[in-house]
């Protein structure tokens, strides 16, 4: 993609009167258009002037993905459908204008009011041939205002019916403009002109989306039909007060529709409404030409219904690079737009919105990546992100008797789908999970009658389903089966039992967490409920039946890819006990390292003659015959030795977890936070202490995860590590080390050239993040209840 901007010698305003800060983005790459590289058609329209033309180009092959070719009939049918690409709810703020004005021009506000032009470039049809050898063209589109280019599309190679699917916006001072649309064929030297058309904005109705088919024409060409360009155009007010006044209205509507106890028929419909039909893959790429004044952080917040995502904080800069990818679930009955808002944060409470806009998702095509560059508030730059809508498979809610895996045909098709011989198909789908939530017993009572209104929420990653509510009981029987697709075999399924309180927030009753790799298929398990931090047990039990079917090859590949992040993670708080626990964990790791160094030192000092003699002989043989492949081979032998120790019962590595307490630290800290004293004194340095606490936790996590790989805490991970070590040893043995480093370096250096919007990752860290730390081993440990505990108690 590339953006082109013509700037004057003084950075005041562009020709449409809009400040350049809000009209364009800061370039990541820059080049000057010299006369011999300028398009011939542009020279006719734009004679030499003192303007300096700068073309900001990303990579033209950036978004070229393998897309299925569609027939002309499909494309024509698609263009005839009514278009509502932009949010129709944006008409609401104009109702007051329409009620008081008779003349349409009376809706136009004062001269200070600016407009926002939104264009969705969809596709071209029957374009002219410019490459005579291949009989095709390499078309791209330029959009201009008064001869000045404000947007340039990507190049679609070897196609006369290209599909762009690019959406962008541009600010305007007034409506007296005509957008010039020009199509070119990309060549190595001079690009060939393929026709032009225009869009008059004067007579466009505000907040109405027009689906246009622009017929291309060239007076200098002898060709009668040069093809069609299909676009969606919407002109609206650019007013920050209108946008921000819409947020409270949405919240009030949601509050009015808050859940309350309903009949059983309505609850059945609610179970169906939980299931999503598609997944929105969103990639936040970067910001362009953001203001750089002051110090602080900036972040982007995405919202789709109840789903929220907050990006990582970056320092205020002109071109922030987020490079984050996440998924939202698309529900069939949810027609709300995707809301995107950029915030700046200075200090503890200095939060300011730099702009918010909405994306209508109802017209997104399946499996096609849509490119968005949207303008923020005046002078705040713009955001660049990608959206892809993918179909969803494997989500269902049913009774236990009619669960998918109880039917032999469905079970056979699922097993075949994830068999080893089909590993090359649908690499993104790792596996299939079925959870039978049978019942719970002896739950805590929340009302005066000794009863509760329990429901169970099932969470797997960012996917969430829940049972219906059973009223007035502490021994509910749900007997519901839930199925979910598995994105990562290292995920943990969490089941939370809540008490419904009508309009108020539900009350927490208990929680359990089960790693998918520990599931024993088809076996009923009765587990004690734990408290919210999964540290200690709570009152009550829950009975489950879990089944996991997954492909080991896809699961292994996914292990070395970035781990999915939680959409809205809880805010970390400073805790003296958490800090002390992290210090203890780091000290334990450092003690083990020091003990190893002392052991090596004792060999040098000949404290034990036999041990020192054996160590000396090993040293001589190893150094004399040392090759690089011996390093992964040594680690492989070490993992094998630990496995032998565990199988023979000579070693046990669960003793370290005995002293790993997980008490009710949060409750005690909340009580202490209200007291004045020490916490007030360290208020100024609380952020620094929190950073130290988190760094210590990361160091401890890495050390414990490496230890747990060698300890076979997760056999799948240890086996995968053995396989990687064996392959590494073979590569180092047969291939010179310099060649391996060369291949690695070429891959790293060309990764962004091959895909400029790629998400950076470190395969080793991604692998380690899947291994549980000692804290997580305590949290995920299953406390099985005796069979008698699962039965409801009889009243005497």
Image: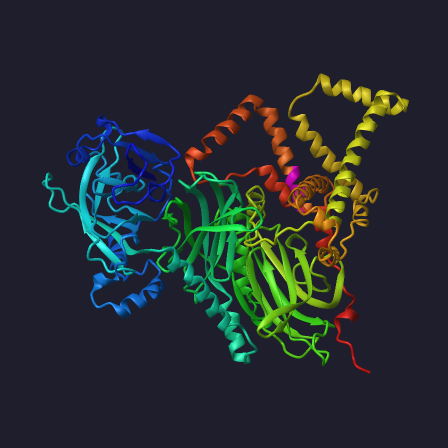
The image shows residue 778, relative to residue 146, as above or below, that is below
Which portion, as a residue range, is magenta?
716-722
In this view, the residue in front, 253 or 735, is: 253
Answer yes or no: is residue 130 visible: no
| x then y, percent, for residue 207 | 29, 60
**Relative to the observer, which residue lies in front, 275 or 312?**
312
Whether residue 149 appears in magenta in the rendering, the answer is no
Quarter of the image for residue 710 reads top right
- Rendering coords of residue 746 (x, y %): 48, 28
Tell whether position 719 is magenta.
yes
Residue drawn at the location 35% of the way across and 44% of the way down: 22
Q: Is residue 45 visible?
A: yes
Using the image, determine if residue 440 lies above or below residue 709.
below
Name the residue nearer the viewer: 614 or 368: 368
Quadrant location of the N terminus?
top left
Which quadrant does the C terminus fall into? bottom right
Q: Position of residue 535 (x, y in %)?
A: 74, 56
Q: Is residue 340 left or right of residue 143?
A: right
- Horizontal placement of 139 versus 685: left or right? left
Main SS class of the magenta portion in the image: helix
Residue 773 horizontal/vertical position (percent): 70, 46
């Amino acid at each position: 993609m590339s953006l082109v901007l013509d700037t004057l010698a003084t950075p005041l305003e562009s020709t449409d009167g809009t400040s350049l800060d809000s009209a364009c983005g800061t370039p990541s790459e820059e080049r000057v258009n010299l006369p011999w590289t300028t398009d011939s058609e542009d020279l006719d329209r734009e004679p030499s002037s003192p303007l300096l033309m700068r073309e900001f180009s990303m990579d033209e092959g950036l978004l070229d993905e393998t897309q299925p070719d569609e027939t002309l009939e499909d494309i024509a049918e698609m263009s005839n459908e009514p278009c509502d690409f932009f949010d129709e709810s944006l008409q609401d703020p104009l109702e007051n204008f329409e009620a008081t004005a008779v003349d349409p021009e009376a809706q136009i506000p004062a001269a200070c009011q600016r407009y926002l032009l939104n264009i969705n470039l969809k596709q071209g049809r029957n374009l002219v041939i410019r490459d005579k050898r291949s009989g095709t063209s390499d078309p791209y589109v330029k959009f201009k205002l008064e001869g000045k280019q404000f947007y340039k599309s990507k190049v679609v190679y070897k196609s006369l019916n290209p599909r762009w699917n690019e959406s962008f916006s541009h600010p305007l001072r007034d409506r007296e403009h005509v957008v010039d649309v020009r199509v070119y064929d990309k060549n190595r030297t001079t690009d060939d002109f393929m026709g032009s058309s225009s869009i008059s904005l004067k007579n466009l109705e505000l907040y109405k989306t027009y689906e246009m088919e622009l017929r291309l024409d060239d007076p200098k060409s002898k060709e009668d039909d040069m093809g069609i360009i299909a676009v969606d155009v919407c002109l609206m007010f650019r007013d920050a007060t209108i946008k921000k006044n819409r947020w409270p209205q949405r919240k009030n509507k949601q509050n009015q529709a808050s859940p309350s106890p309903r009949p059983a028929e309505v609850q059945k419909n609610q179970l169906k409404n939980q299931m999503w039909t598609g997944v929105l893959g969103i990639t936040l790429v970067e910001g362009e030409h953001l203001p750089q004044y002051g110090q602080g952080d900036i972040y982007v917040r995405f919202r789709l219904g109840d789903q929220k995502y907050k990006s990582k904080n970056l320092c205020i800069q002109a071109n922030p690079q987020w490079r984050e990818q996440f998924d939202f679930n698309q529900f069939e009955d949810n027609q709300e737009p995707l809301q995107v808002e950029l915030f700046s944060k200075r200090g503890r409470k200095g939060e300011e919105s730099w702009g918010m806009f909405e994306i209508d998702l109802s017209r997104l095509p399946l499996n096609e990546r849509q490119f968005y560059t949207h303008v923020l508030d005046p002078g705040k730059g713009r955001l660049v992100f990608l959206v892809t809508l993918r179909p969803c498979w494997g989500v269902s809610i049913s009774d236990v008797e009619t669960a998918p895996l109880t039917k032999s045909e469905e079970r056979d098709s699922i097993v075949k789908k994830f068999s080893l011989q089909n590993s090359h198909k649908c690499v993104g789908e790792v596996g299939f999970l079925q959870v039978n939530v049978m019942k719970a017993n002896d739950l805590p009572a929340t009302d005066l009658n000794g009863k509760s209104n329990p429901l169970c929420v099932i969470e797997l990653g960012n996917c969430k389903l829940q049972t219906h509510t059973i009223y007035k009981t502490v021994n509910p029987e749900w007997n519901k089966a839930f199925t979910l697709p598995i994105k990562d075999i290292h995920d943990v399924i969490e089941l939370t039992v809540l008490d419904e309180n009508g309009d108020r927030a539900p009350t927490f009753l208990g929680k359990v967490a089960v790693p998918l790799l520990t599931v024993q298929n088809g076996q009923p398990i009765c587990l004690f409920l734990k408290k919210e931090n999964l540290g200690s047990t709570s009152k009550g039990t829950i009975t489950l039946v879990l089944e996991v079917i997954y492909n080991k090859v896809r699961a292994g590949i996914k292990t070395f890819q970035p781990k999915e992040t939680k959409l809205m993670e809880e805010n970390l708080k400073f805790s003296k006990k958490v800090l002390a626990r992290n210090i203890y964990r780091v000290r334990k790791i450092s003690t083990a390292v020091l003990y190893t160094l002392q052991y090596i030192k004792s060999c040098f000092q000949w404290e034990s003659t036999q041990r020192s003699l054996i160590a000396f002989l090993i040293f001589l043989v190893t150094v004399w015959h040392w090759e690089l492949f011996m390093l992964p081979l040594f680690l492989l032998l070490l993992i094998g030795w630990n496995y032998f120790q565990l199988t023979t019962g000579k070693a046990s590595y669960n003793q370290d977890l005995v002293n790993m307490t997980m008490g009710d630290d949060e409750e005690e800290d909340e009580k202490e936070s209200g007291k004045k004293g020490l916490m007030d004194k360290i208020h100024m340095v609380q952020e620094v202490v929190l950073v130290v606490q988190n760094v210590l936790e990361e160091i401890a996590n890495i050390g414990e995860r490496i230890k747990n790989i060698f300890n076979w805490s997760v056999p799948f991970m240890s086996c995968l590590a053995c396989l990687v070590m064996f392959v590494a040893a073979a590569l180092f043995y047969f291939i010179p080390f310099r060649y391996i480093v060369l291949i690695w370096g070429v891959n790293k250096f060309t990764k962004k050239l091959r895909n400029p919007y790629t998400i950076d990752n470190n395969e080793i860290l991604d692998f380690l993040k899947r291994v549980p730390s000692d804290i997580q081993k305590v949290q995920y440990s299953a406390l099985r209840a005796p069979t008698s505990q699962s039965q409801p108690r009889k009243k005497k």
